[in-house]
Image: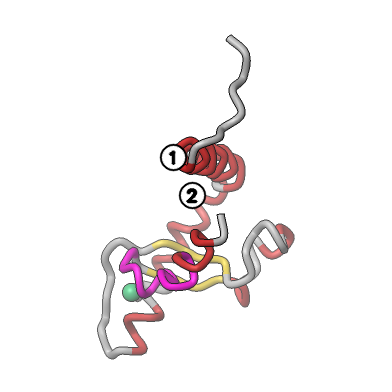
Amino acid sequence: MAYKVPTSGQDRRKEYYRRKAVERSAKYDNQWANFSKNYRKSHPFCVECLKLGIHNTSHLQVDHIIPLEKRPDLKYEDTNLQVLCRRPWCRGYFSFMSFKENL
Ligand SMILES: [Zn+2]
């Protein structure tokens, strides 16, 4: 079957998430998984929650301040890393929404 170029908004979104998943599996390999586990051990709180005085230790992910796409060389650089939880406002939900509008 020939590859169908996504036309509708829904197809475009599907294509976007598929591409994202491929990128993620390439970037976040086993080495990263181990590194991030250790990093979260030494930085056990979400930095955004901490600003609000909440010591949140659940659903933590290590985030790159300058995105990996821009600076892949900073992947393991301490100064480019921060621990965030999955709460939308900790993960820059509003900037994500404006990003989505530009799709
Ligand atoms: Zn948080």
For residue 18, say whether it is visible. yes
Residue at image position (56%, 32%) is 6
Most foreground residue, 75 or 23: 23
- Between 89 and 3, the residue placed more toward the observer is 3
Near-viewer residue (19 or 46): 19
Q: Which quadrant does the N terminus fall into?
A: top right
Residue 49, quarter of the rendered image: bottom left
Q: What amino acid type is highlighted by mark number 1?
A: Gln
Q: Which residues are magenta?
A: 86-96
Q: What type is the residue that disc 2 sits on?
A: Ala
Q: Where residue 54 sits: x, y (%)?
A: 25, 84
Q: Is residue 21 left or right of residue 57?
A: right
Badge 2: few (under 14), some or many (20 or more) residues near its Cα, within 10 Å? Answer: few
The label shown at residue 33 is 2
Asked if 24 appears above or below 69 in the picture, the reply is above
Q: Secondary structure at mark 2?
A: helix
Q: Is residue 1 above or below residue 15?
A: above
Q: Could you tell me residue 31's position as x and y percent?
A: 57, 47
Q: Quadrant of the C terminus?
A: bottom right
Q: Which residue is mark 1?
A: 10
**Residue 95 covered by magenta stretch:** yes
Compared with 57, 9 (above or below) is above
Tell me the chief SS of the magenta region: loop
**Residue at screen point 49% across, 51% down:** 34
Residue at the (60%, 47%) spot, across then down: 27
Most foreground residue, 56 or 11: 11
